[in-house]
Amino acid sequence: MYVANKKRYENMQYNRVGNSGLKLPAMSLGLWHNFGDVDRLQTQKDILFCAFDHGITHFDLANNYGPPAGSAEKNFGRILREDFKSYRDELIISSKAGYYMWPGPYGEWGSKKNIVASCDQSLKRMGLDYVDIFYHHRPDPETPIEETAQALDLLVRQGKALYIGVSNYSAEQTREITKVFKELRTPFIIHQPRYNMMDRWIEDGLTDVLAQEHLGAITFSPLAQGILTDRYLNGIPEDSRAGRSSSPFLSPEKVDETIDKVRKLNDIAKKRGQTLAEMALAWNLQEPTVTSVLIGASRVSQLEDNLKALNNLDFSEEELKEVDKILL
């Protein structure tokens, strides 16, 4: 039986989400990959145990995580039941609905039918009475935003979620749904956008909306699918994500067009006494609206390496200007 490290809270930084009462660890663990039925269960356990032992209290899931879809929640539920049950009140568990999950017109997007059914399915797979945060995973171009907001609000009123978030919403979409949530008095507190040194789209309006509305951000893909690591500094390994022709997220062309910038960023990281990945993670957290950064891991050593970023989160003005000069 797993017994947590008694010193787990000593070295982690916890940040308040907007002006809510909730705090998240500076680094949260995402279960998008590496926690499906195709992955070894003991490895999943080892990663989760290591995360919690280092103060990572937030585990982020979605209905379609796996593969296959749904298996990450199912496996997490088993580990929760077998090893984390006594620690439930220390954990922040989140899930999402919005991407394709089952056939027919109600298996994706943002209708009330989809959101309520998805949440019920997620709770059943994980063996939970409620999740701490439930997100709408992507905006729906056809369903009225009022319907999506009301469905998410209903989950809170039914006791199935404590807080509400959105993901992949633009600045204008975020502002629009915030208005509805204010009218409903929904505890809408967080946005989950993609954000990294190579993809700074949230700086073009979304961070302003988050600050104005007192919302927090938890960012995903902080390492740009591995570009912001030392993985590609000397070429493209055959076993890398970019080296696999089946990867839809990273291609050799993408590596080639960014590698000069990556090498310059790596020089800055060396001066800071960090790896490129450590600096990239720390850089996310210097954005004032970012509460937490989502990291993924396929093995314990990878997780431990990422956690080293917490040893140096401060950037001088000169360093930030140098980064901007390379990237902008």
Image (cartoon, grey):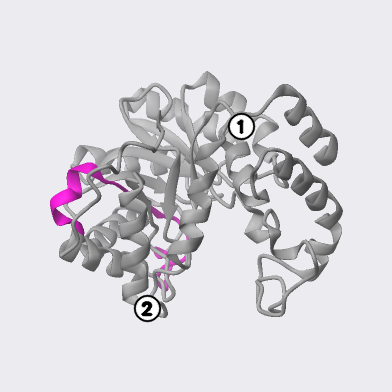
Name the one closer to the observer, 288 or 12: 12
Image quarter (top left, top right, bottom left or bottom right) of the C terminus: top right
Question: Would you call the spot at circle 1 few (<14 residues within 10 Å), some (14-19), or many (20 or more)?
Answer: many
Where residue 132 appears, as percent x and y from the top left, is: 28, 43
Q: Is residue 204 magenta?
A: no
Residue at screen point 47% across, 62% down: 301
- Give the x, y percent position of residue 207: 60, 29
Find disc 1 in the rendering and name its residue: 206
Q: How many marks are shown on the rendered structure?
A: 2
Element under disc 1: helix
Q: Is residue 95 above or below residue 239?
A: above
Where is residue 181, by image quadrant?
top left
Residue 40 shows which numbered tag? 2
Magenta run includes residue 85: yes
| Whole-number angstrom distance, CA of label 2 to CA of label 1 | 38 Å
Query: Looking at the image, which is closer to me, 285 or 185?
Result: 285
Classify residue 80 as left or right of residue 19. Answer: left
The image quarter in which residue 55 lies: top left
**Looking at the image, residue 71 lies above or below residue 11:** below
Relative image position of residue 20 (x, y in whole percent): 35, 25
**Viewer can see residue 195:** no
Amino acid type, callout 2:
Arg
Look at the image and give the residue range highlighted in magenta: 84-107
Which numbered disc flags the more N-terminal residue, 2 or 1?
2
